[in-house]
Image (cartoon, grey):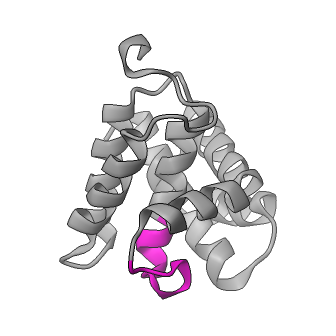
Amino acid sequence: MGSRTKARECALQALYQLDTSGGTPADVLAGLWAHFEPVDEDTKAFAEALVSGARREQTTIDQLIQRTSTNWKLERMARVDRNILRLAVYEILKRADVPVKVTLNEAIELSKKYGSEESSAFVNGILDRIANSSGLPGQVPKQER
């Protein structure tokens, strides 16, 4: 497993825990690093950037997910799916160093591993609509990616 793939997995676990029981990103990540397999510094740094960024931008991200997910209220989404979406939307909006296609593929793989049978199709559908929307804040036009 690649360093960034592992970082996304760790970030998802942290976002899920924050969504479930609250706390601070720093505390949740410290607990994650203390209780699980050793993770290299690059993986930790990327995971920490994803978690802090997704939390910082959560209001904007949640509004975008809600507008895009017709017939699904954010609160009714499976907690895993909701946090995979938050993680991926943060990358799409704010991480120009990560190609959108990579973000989409990684999110789908996370949903297959941690979500329900329907999760990957659900996550893919919402992220595809978001990634192909024009006028998103921070969005880089497709030809420049």
Give 125 or 105, whichever is nearer the viewer.
125
Q: Position of residue 121 (x, y in %)?
A: 21, 64
Residue appearing at x 62%, y 31% in the figure? 138
The secondary structure that dominates the magenta segment is: helix
Give 26 or 106, whichever is nearer the viewer.
106
Q: Position of residue 11 (x, y in %)?
A: 56, 55
Give 46 or 131, whichever is nearer the viewer.
131
Residue appearing at x 31%, y 48% in the figure? 128
104 relative to 69 in the view: left or right: left
Q: Quadrant of residue 69?
A: bottom left
37 in relation to 17, above or below:
above
Q: Is residue 75 magenta?
A: yes
Q: Quadrant of residue 123?
A: bottom left
141 relative to 138 in the view: left or right: left
Quadrant location of the C terminus in the rendered image: top left
Count the numbered circles shown: 0
Q: Position of residue 54 (x, y in %)?
A: 65, 52
Residue appearing at x 42%, y 80% in the figure? 72
User: Which residue in the rendered view is the most extreme toward the bottom?
Assistant: 76
Q: Which residues are magenta?
A: 71-83
Residue appearing at x 26%, y 54% in the figure? 109
User: Which residue in the rendered view is the most extreme toward the top?
Assistant: 144
Quadrant location of the N terminus in the rendered image: top left
5 relative to 122 in the view: left or right: right
Q: Is residue 28 magenta?
A: no
Residue 128 visible in this rendered orientation of the protein = yes
70 in relation to 120, above or below:
below
